Amino acid sequence: MTRDKQLFPDDEIGDALWALQEDGEDLSFEREVEFAVIFPDEQAALDFAIMLLQNGQKVAYSEYDGDEKLPWQVLAYPVMEPSHENISGYEQLLAEHSEPLGGKTDGWSAL
């Protein structure tokens, strides 16, 4: 199958989605997608998690050992069709709202 650059652009998200499709994953239906955001302290992570909860999002938060400067993690689980547009848009939204709290997006995975 030839890669459609409109659906699967040459970037990290496009590459990951293309790999999922090549592995036989059906990307045409909605499912939970896990997004990670990491923070410098527990209070910032909690504040961000509360903001997501107030906006109807399913979340989890915990300590994170992958970055010693950002040792707290919030996971968000929106339900969406895993498309480049949806994933990049949601990551952008998370970045905008987490940056004032010192947060940084840290990837996603389709569940």
Image (tube, rainbow, N blue to C red):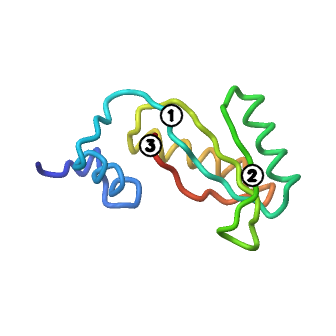
Report the number of numbered marks: 3
Near-viewer residue (1 or 97): 1
- Residue 110 bears which disc, if any? 3
Element type at mark 2 = strand
Residue that appears at 69% across and 26% down = 56
Q: Nearer the viewer, mark 2 or mark 3?
A: 2
- Kind of element beneath mark 3: strand
Which comes sooner in the sequence, label 1 or label 3? 1
User: How far apart are the alpha carbons under marks 2 and 1?
Assistant: 19 Å
- Marks 2/3: CA–CA distance: 20 Å
**Location of residue 12 in the rendering, given as x and y in whole percent from the top left corner:** 40, 60
Label placed on residue 32 = 1
Of the residues shown, which amino acid type is indicated by label 1?
Answer: Glu
Name the amino acid type tagged 2.
Answer: Ser
Closest to the camera, between mark 2 and mark 1, is 2
Gap in angstroms between the C-alphas marked 1 and 3? 7 Å
Give the vertical position of 88 relative to 78 (above or below). Answer: below
> Residue, x 69% and y 67% (percent of image)?
65
Name the side, left or right, on which 5 lies relative to 69: left
**Of pointers 2 and 1, the one earlier in the residue sequence:** 1
Residue pictured at 33% horizontal, 57% vertical: 15
Q: Position of residue 50 (x, y in %)?
A: 81, 37
Please state the horizontal and vertical placement of residue 109, each as a whole percent of the image.
47, 48
Residue underneath mark 2:
62
Judged from the image, the secondary structure of the residue bearing numbered disc 1 is strand
